[in-house]
Image: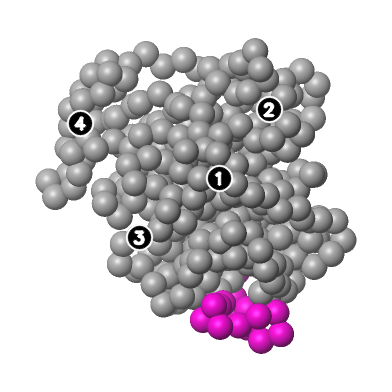
Amino acid sequence: MKKHLAVLAVPLLFSLCAAGPVLADDDHGHGKGLFIDRDVDTFAVLPAGVTNPEGITANPANGDIYVSTFVAPIKLLRYNRHGRLLAQRDFAQPLLGLEFRDNKVYITNVGNFVGADSKIQRVNADLTGLEDVAIMPHVGAPAPNFAVGNPDGSTDFITFGDNASVPNALVFDSNGTLYISDSFQGAVFKIAHVAACNVATCVVDTLSHDGLLATVGFPPFGANGLAFNTDESVLYVANTGDDRVLKIDPGTGAVSTFSESLNGADGLVFDKSSGLLWVCTNQADEVVALNANGRVVAKLGEFRGINKDGTPDGLLFPASPVIVGKEIFVTNLAIALTGAAGDEPEEDVKLWTVSKMRLPH
């Protein structure tokens, strides 16, 4: 069960590091060395009956925002920069992550959840021309007896289960290679030169298949959000169930821990202008920024309750972020997962939303 705490705020001014960005005063700052802004605006309300927005991406040329949904009726929605719905497309299988490149929207389609192949798809920017790009391989769970050390010197051994391929988040490198996280198989895959291939020719390679990318925690999704740092020497990966962000060496596939105790770390986006990694913490109902050392240096948003029209006030189970200009846009998945009736505010949502917040400057 999530606990939603109100945070009082006072102004502050601080510099993240000698060569890093300066975060200016804000009417909602709080605490030394930590920038907090709880202001959240609603960017768009999904059409009535369309629920649980998950993935998000943007067309950098015109600011169009694309949103995918996870629960039927499953949709891919296209909004203009001002939150007006321009187009929508129906899908038969649950959709998770989205990524925009070369005037196309790439999509992770979790067919395994409904008895079909899980795959990567793409559509044109206007949502026409749906194409299957690649069928996701089934590599199984990471090796059994994954060892986890304890403070008393003992060791726990975990054997992960796996019944599905669950491609989740997407990110491109500057060479056009597409990277895909798999939340159930504990893996990160890659497809080189994906723009020139299709389902008949794409080769899906395994970059990493590691117990650190799997989870036995809650929510029950391992490898999730993906983001590269500025020079692409590090690929960041959120592990939602383990409340951490990991880092992968793109050359070797080696996985290590970058930051811990991020409650439900979900979608990621790296802001090259500030050098900060933004993380949707879906169980804390906020978006946090990590500096190069993995330290939380900023927090945005909060959950304030359910409005009279049934929309969340603020953030509720924020899943995926995208940065456009000086704003960060976030999908409010708002999905109840505990299974206990009356236990979660997500049960009271009647209309689902996409939020936007201003980035610290």
Q: Nearer the viewer, residue 65 or 14?
A: 65
N-terminal-most mark, 2 or 4: 4
Q: Secondary structure at mark 2?
A: loop
Q: Nearer the viewer, mark 1 or mark 2?
A: 1
Image quarter where the C terminus lies is: top left
> What's under tag 1, amino acid-wise?
Tyr
Residue ID at (33%, 37%): 359
Q: Nearer the viewer, residue 276 or 42?
A: 42
The residue that label 1 is drawn on is 79
**Residue 258, image x and y in percent?**
41, 53
Q: Are marks 1 and 2 in contact (CB under 8 Å)?
A: no
> What's under tag 4, amino acid-wise?
Ala
Residue ID at (41%, 47%): 323
Residue ID at (31%, 20%): 28
**Residue 332, image x and y in percent?**
59, 35
Residue ID at (52%, 24%): 314
* Circle 4 Cα neighbour tier, 10 Å, few/some/many (<14 / 14–19 / ≥20): some
> What's under tag 3, amino acid-wise?
Asn
Say which quarter of the image contains residue 168: bottom right
Q: Is residue 157 left or right of residue 237?
A: right
Residue 335 higher or lower than 21, as above or below = above
**Residue 18, image x and y in percent?**
12, 46
The residue that label 3 is drawn on is 229
Q: Nearer the viewer, mark 4 or mark 1?
A: 1
**Residue 215, image x and y in percent?**
64, 51
* Magenta region, residue range: 191-209
N-terminal-most mark, 4 or 1: 4
Give the CA distance from mark 4 to mark 1: 30 Å
Q: Which mark is residue 24?
A: 4
